[in-house]
Amino acid sequence: MSEAVQRFEAGLADVEGAYQGALGAANSETELREANAKIVGPQGALTQLMKLMRDLPGDRRKEFGQLANALKGKVTALFDDRLAAIARAQREAELTGPALDVTMPARWSREGRLHPITRVKHELLDIFASLGFEVAEGPEADTHENCFDKLGFPPDHPATDMQDTFFLTHTERGDDITTLLRTHTSTVQIREMGRRPAPLAVVSPGVVYRRDDDATHSPMFHQIEGFLVDEGVSFADLKGVLGVFVERLFGADVEMRFRASYFPFVEPGAEVDVRRPGGKWMEILGCGMIHPTVLENVGYDPKKVSGFAFGLGIDRIAMVKYAIPNIKLLFENDQRFLQSL
Ligand code: PHE
């Protein structure tokens, strides 16, 4: 008998003797597939054996081919049986095993929410919107004219010292254009009145910049500007609107007072303070009757129309509302602080 025949017979006998044990010992689908691959996979024992077929004498090839194929068929049939049995056992274990524990505590995902300044801003705008004011916005970088000149600040007036800011220069169509980071939202008075006739009632929220930096002042802070122009508007209308505003925001037991003050763009001008029962007076806004010169500067006729304006600090109101001692806390985004509000 040729050597090749001997090797082939021995190889077939090895596989025949081992495959049932190997597949039978596998306890999971992975183990089963691994065991199966060792027999009929590309590197498997039976596959390798079949590659030796061409060394066999021609008259024996058919016979051995049939034997090898029959063996492969038996291996595959057992593999399929075992695979089904393993799947059944797994399903059985799921059904008879411990049930899903619905009392286990859920894992909460952390949800973000609006920043306190944004929440207060929405609250303030809602109050003014309910009183008939519309909302308009202006750019943070604006001209010297809109920020100072048209509001009646005389050139180099000391009032502009309090509102020192960054000047920005860029070139547009060959010309150097100077803008500045606005020091107040009163710029929007000039912009909105300048582009449409009275009557109008507008509130304008936004960011402003100043050279201020201490516990109650930040170089960047938030304001809401409000203004209303129509025929026959008086200081009584201003008091009425701000009175409703303060009552809605802080409650009926909060006192309010007007203190005479100076802003170049109003006459008369005032500051408004509020006080909780037993508390200290806190300044929350500046206001006044829009100066006739400002009305002229935007093309209105001060003999026909009059108006009031006010500017309030959103951060300042958030500090009063949430009793926050330092304005910087609002900008550090420390989660421990924000979650305490
Ligand atoms: N623009 C003033 C400020 O920022 C506030 C103000 C607005 C005062 C409107 C009067 C009228 O200090």
Image: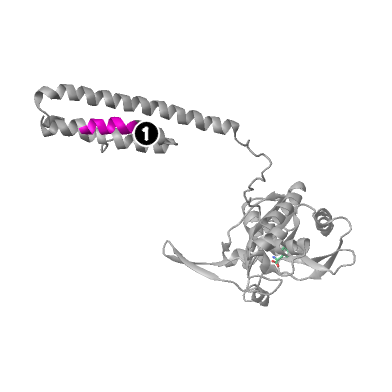
Q: Which residue is mark 1?
A: 21
* Residue 165 on image: x %, y %: 59, 72
Q: Residues within 10 Å of mark 1 (few under 14, many from 20)?
A: few
Q: Is 78 contained in the magenta span?
A: no
Q: Which residues are magenta?
A: 10-19
Q: Residue furthest front?
A: 1
Q: Quadrant of ligand 1?
A: bottom right
Residue 92 in view, yes or no:
yes
- Which residue is depicted at the point 68% across and 60% down? 338
**251 lies left or right of 339:** right
Residue 6: image location, x then y, percent:
16, 32
Question: In this orientation, which residue lies closer to the viewer: 25 or 250?
Answer: 25
Q: Residue at x 10, y 22 (%)?
A: 59
User: Which quarter of the figure is the C terminus placed in?
Assistant: bottom right
| Amino acid on which the number 1 mark rests in the picture | Gly
Most foreground residue, 202 or 123: 123
Above or below residue 55? Residue 271 is: below
- Location of residue 140 by image quarter: bottom right
* Color encoding of the figure: one colour
